[in-house]
Image: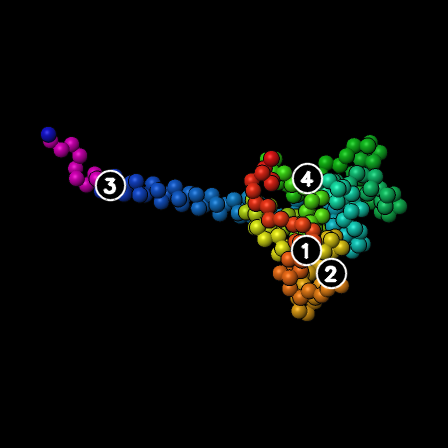
Amino acid sequence: MAQIFHRSTNTLSKLSIFGAVFFLAGLGGIASLVIRSGFYTQIYVAREQPIPFSHKHHAGGLGIDCRYCHTSVETSSFAGIPPTKTCMSCHAQIWADSPTLEPVRASFRSDKSIEWNRVHKVADFVYFDHSIHITKGVGCATCHGRIDQMPLTRKQNTLLMEWCIGCHQHPEENLRPRSEIFNMAYEQPSASAPVVHRGESYTRQAALGAVLMEEYKVQSLTACATCHR
């Protein structure tokens, strides 16, 4: 039977198959880079808000505790957005006639909530509980960064699964005493700045983290069902 295809067709076929494999692998690599990029994760990008609220001014400058506004953060799965009456408890007297704060006053008068643009958000299929992280010794700044230094709120970490898993695999690396949870300026122990916990001085995070893991009964939870329920 006469040969239909030239012998070079075999070589071209092999090159095509291998080329397709490398092409698909390249596409996967590019997709992986895009997903981790700031363009996709929006880290370090300040979100525009209906009112230019400054955590730097309120939490950093005035020293207002996180829990004054985020009242449910210690007891609930969500931190909670403060109602307008919380804002007006101060701004009924301070900057009461400021044009910038007119949306706050309008919200208070109409009893209609201000529609803030969410900055930190995990996927709908992910279960996250603020209260359990605080109970186990994870500080606000660990996830949110130095929000007390942000004139406009931005995301500090990607919140991708690999970022969460990294902490869940080695929780001792990020634990702090519960008394320091809301201390934005807290720094992990070092030889020059030890951390005192229950009368003991610690100069290494590894030693302090191991103690806190046992004391707070922290587990390394990496099973899918921990977050995906």
Q: How far apart are marks 1 and 4 (CA)?
A: 36 Å
Circle nearer the N terminus (3, 1)? 3
Q: Distance between the residues labelled 4 and 3?
A: 54 Å
- Identify which residue, 92 or 198, lies in the foreground: 198
Residue drawn at (21%, 39%) of the image: 10
Per the image, is 183 magenta?
Answer: no
Indicate the amino acid at tag 1: Leu
Indicate the amino acid at tag 2: His
Judged from the image, the secondary structure of the residue bearing numbered disc 4 is: loop
* Left or right of 127 on screen, residue 53: right
- Mark number displayed over residue 12: 3
Judged from the image, the secondary structure of the residue bearing numbered disc 1 is: helix
Read off the residue under disc 1.
212
Indicate the amino acid at tag 3: Leu
- Identify which residue, 118 or 196, lies in the foreground: 196
Q: How far apart are marks 2 and 3 (CA)?
A: 69 Å
- Mark number displayed over residue 56: none
- Residues in magenta, as a range: 2-10
Whether residue 152 can be seen here: no
Circle nearer the N terminus (2, 4)? 4
Q: How far apart are marks 3 and 1 (CA)?
A: 62 Å
- Mark number displayed over residue 197: 2
Indicate the amino acid at tag 4: Asn
Judged from the image, the secondary structure of the residue bearing numbered disc 2 is: strand
Q: Would you say the residues marked 2 and 3 are in contact, meaning their CB atoms lie under 8 Å apart?
A: no
Read off the residue under disc 4.
117
Rendered image quadrant of residue 202: bottom right
Q: Would you say the residues marked 2 and 1 are in contact, meaning their CB atoms lie under 8 Å apart?
A: yes
Q: Would you say the residues marked 3 and 1 are in contact, meaning their CB atoms lie under 8 Å apart?
A: no
Whether residue 65 can be seen here: yes
